[in-house]
Image: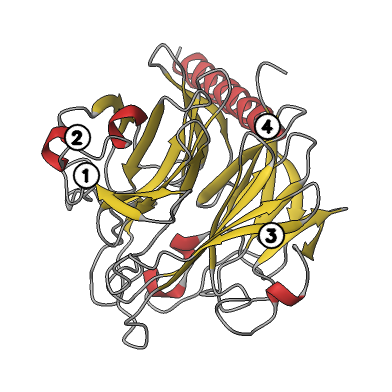
Amino acid sequence: MRTRLILSFLFCHIFFLTMLAQVNNTTASKLEVAAALGPYRPIGVSVTSNNRLFVSFPKQAKNYQYALTEIINGKPVPYPNEEWNLKGKENSHFVNVQDIFVDTEDNLWVLDSKPSSAGSIFGKDEKSTQGQFKLLKIDTKKNKIEHIYRFDDLDKTKSGLNDMRIDHKRNLAYLSDPGQAAIIILDLKTGQTRKALTGSRFTLADPDVILSYNGIEMRNENGKPFSSNVNSIALSHDFKYLYFKPINQTHLYCIATEFLANKRLTDQELEAKVKDKGEVGITHGLLADIDGNIYLTSSIDYSIKYLNPDGNVNTLVRDSRILWPDSMGISGDGYLYFSCAQLFKDHQWNKGVDKVELPYYVFKVKLPKF
C-alpha cells in the first residue's frame, strides 16, 4: 500500500512538472528576438505603421555607441544620421535620449532628457545640477527633423522628464516628470509648458512599495530602495484619456485629456477628475492600442500584461528572459516590441556586483488578435 502511494505521488509530481514545463515552453515560444544589442542597453522602443523599428539608448550606461537608431536587418543604424549621434553641442546633438514615440501620423518624437541631480530616479549625481531637455519631431518619411522644443520655461534644477505622448487633437504633448512628481503639458504651438497634478497622491511614489527580486529588495549601497514618482504614461488612440502611474505604486490611473487641456483647472480640481483603474502591480512602460487595451511591462514577474476595456488584467507573455521590460511599440503587422533594460541587475543595486546578462535584447511578441 505504501509503495503504491509513493509511486502515485511520484507519478503526479512528474506529471505536474511535465505540464509546467509545457506551459513554460509555450509561453516562452511566443517571444521572438527583434534585435540582440551586445553591451548596449536599450530603453526607448517604437515602431511605425510600416514596421520600421526604432530603438534608443541612454548615456548613463557604461557602454554607449548611439543615442537613437533604426534597427535594419537586426543591427542598429544611427538615426536620423550619424552626426546627431556624435558628441557635440547640446543644441545640435543628442545628450541622453530617454524616450521615443511614433505618433498616429508616423512621426517619430524623441525625448532627449538628461535629468538634474534632483530629478534623477537613480540617485544624486553631484556633477549634474542642471538638466538638459529637448523634444524633437522627426518626419520618418523624409528622415528629417521638423521641429525642436527646448523647454525654456521648465525648472531644470528639479525636472527629470521620462516619457511622452502626443495629442494631435489638442496639439499638446504630455510628459511624465518623476523629478517634480508631475505631468508636464507642452503646447506644441507656443512651446510653453505647465505642470499638472504636482505632488499628488496619484503621481508620488508609495514608500511602502519596494521592488523585490527572488526575495531580495532593490536597494543601493546605502540601503535606499529604488523609487520613482510618475514614470510611464499612455494616451488612448482617440486622444480622450491619459493613463499614468509611478513605478512604486500598484494602481493605474487615468484622466480625461479635456481636463488636462483646461488651463483654468487647479491641481486640486484635476485630482478630483482622476480615475483609479485598479490594481495592476508594479509596472514600468505603458502603451495603448487601437482597441483600447493598455499594455504594461513588469519586471517583478518577468511579464507583459494588458488591461482590457472591461477592466480585466491579462498576461500576454511571461518569460525569464524579460528582464526589466521598459518601452514598447506596436507594428502594423501586429507585433508588440519591447526593450529589456535589466536595470535591477546593475551594480548599484547588487552590492557592487554587475549582474547584467549580455546581450541586451529587444523582443517582439505577436498580439492575440493577429
Circle 4 sits on which residue?
25
Q: Secondary structure at mark 3?
A: strand
Q: Residues within 10 Å of mark 4 (few under 14, many from 20)?
A: few
Frontmost of labels 3 and 2 is 3
User: Residue at point 17% right, 51% down?
Assistant: 199
- Compared across the picture, whether 244 is left or right of 87 comes to left
Circle 2 sits on which residue?
270
Q: Which mark is residue 145?
A: 3
Q: Nearer the viewer, residue 164 or 53?
A: 164
In the figure, residue 25 lies in which quadrant? top right
Q: Amino acid at mark 2?
A: Leu
- Compared across the picture, whether 150 is left or right of 122 comes to right
Q: Are marks 4 and 1 in contact (CB under 8 Å)?
A: no
Q: Residues within 10 Å of mark 1 (few under 14, many from 20)?
A: many
Q: Amino acid at mark 3?
A: Ile
In the figure, residue 155 lies in which quadrant? bottom left
Q: Are marks 4 and 2 in contact (CB under 8 Å)?
A: no
Q: Are marks 2 and 1 in contact (CB under 8 Å)?
A: yes
Which is more N-terminal, label 1 or label 2?
Answer: 1
Q: Secondary structure at mark 4?
A: helix
Instruction: State how far apart marks 3 and 2 are (Cα).
Output: 34 Å
Frontmost of labels 4 and 1 is 1
Q: Is residue 10 above or below residue 28?
A: above
Instruction: State how far apart marks 4 and 1 are (Cα).
Output: 43 Å
